[in-house]
Image (cartoon, helix red, strand yellow):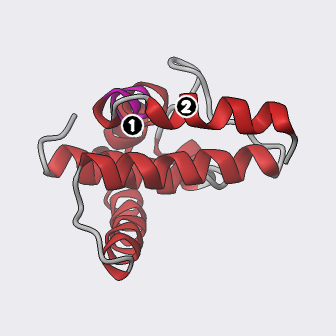
């Protein structure tokens, strides 16, 4: 990690958790959840990812709240960036259940974060 990355990281982490969750919802959550709610097989996959997210947060001794979900989403996004993958900008996410069923990592875990935020009324 370079010094310039160290300078950027605290700024990104300083954003309020709900702002980050709202941005994640805009980027992938709206389209991903719409597709999942229309296709039971896709919803089952998102539910599996949600269980993994929930378990990971609880295994870390944290509660599932806005801060922990935003932190998890940040970690996924950072991991994707390290792998040369990007998270779509709002309006550029896949459309339709078939596209989401074949979506590359990290999209479904991020949709799962959005589902948990929606269920907890954190959006």
- Residue 39 in sight here: no
In the displayed structure, does residue 10 sit left or right of residue 18? right
In the displayed structure, does residue 60 sit left or right of residue 110? left
Question: Badge 1 local density, few (<14 within 10 Å), some, or many (20+)?
Answer: many
Residue 113, numbered label: none
Q: Nearer the viewer, residue 2 or 79?
A: 2
Q: Which quadrant holds residue 3?
A: top right
Percent x, y of residue 64: 24, 61
Tell me whether the residue at label 2 lies in contact with that at label 1, contact meaning CB atoms closer than 8 angstroms.
Answer: no
Q: For numbered disc 2, what is the local secondary structure? A: helix
Please check the rendered image and state whether residue 51 is part of the magenta-colored stretch, yes or no. Answer: no
Cα separation, mark 2 vs mark 1, equals 20 Å
Range drawn in magenta: 19-24
What's the residue at 32%, 70% (across, down)? Answer: 54
- Outermost residue on the left side: it is 121
Residue topped by disc 2: 12
Residue topped by disc 1: 29
Note whether 102 is above or below 55 in the view shown. Answer: above
Percent x, y of residue 56: 41, 75
Q: For numbered disc 1, what is the local secondary structure? A: helix
Residue mark closest to the camera, 2 vs 1? 2
Percent x, y of residue 108: 50, 54
- Outermost residue on the top side: it is 91
Percent x, y of residue 27: 49, 28
Q: Nearer the viewer, residue 95 or 69?
A: 69
In the displayed structure, does residue 5 sit left or right of residue 50? right
Question: Badge 2 local density, few (<14 within 10 Å), some, or many (20+)?
Answer: few
């Amino acid at each position: 990690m370079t010094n310039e990355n160290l300078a950027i990281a605290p700024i990104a982490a300083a954003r309020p958790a709900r702002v980050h969750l709202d941005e994640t919802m805009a980027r992938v959550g709206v389209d991903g959840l719409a597709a999942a709610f229309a296709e039971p097989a896709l919803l089952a996959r998102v539910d599996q990812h949600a269980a993994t997210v929930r378990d990971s947060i609880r295994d870390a001794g944290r509660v599932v709240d806005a801060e922990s979900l935003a932190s998890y989403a940040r970690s996924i996004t950072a991991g994707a960036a390290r792998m040369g993958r990007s998270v779509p900008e709002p309006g550029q996410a896949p459309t339709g259940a078939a596209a989401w069923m074949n979506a590359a990592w990290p999209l479904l875990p991020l949709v799962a974060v959005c589902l948990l935020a929606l269920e907890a009324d954190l959006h």
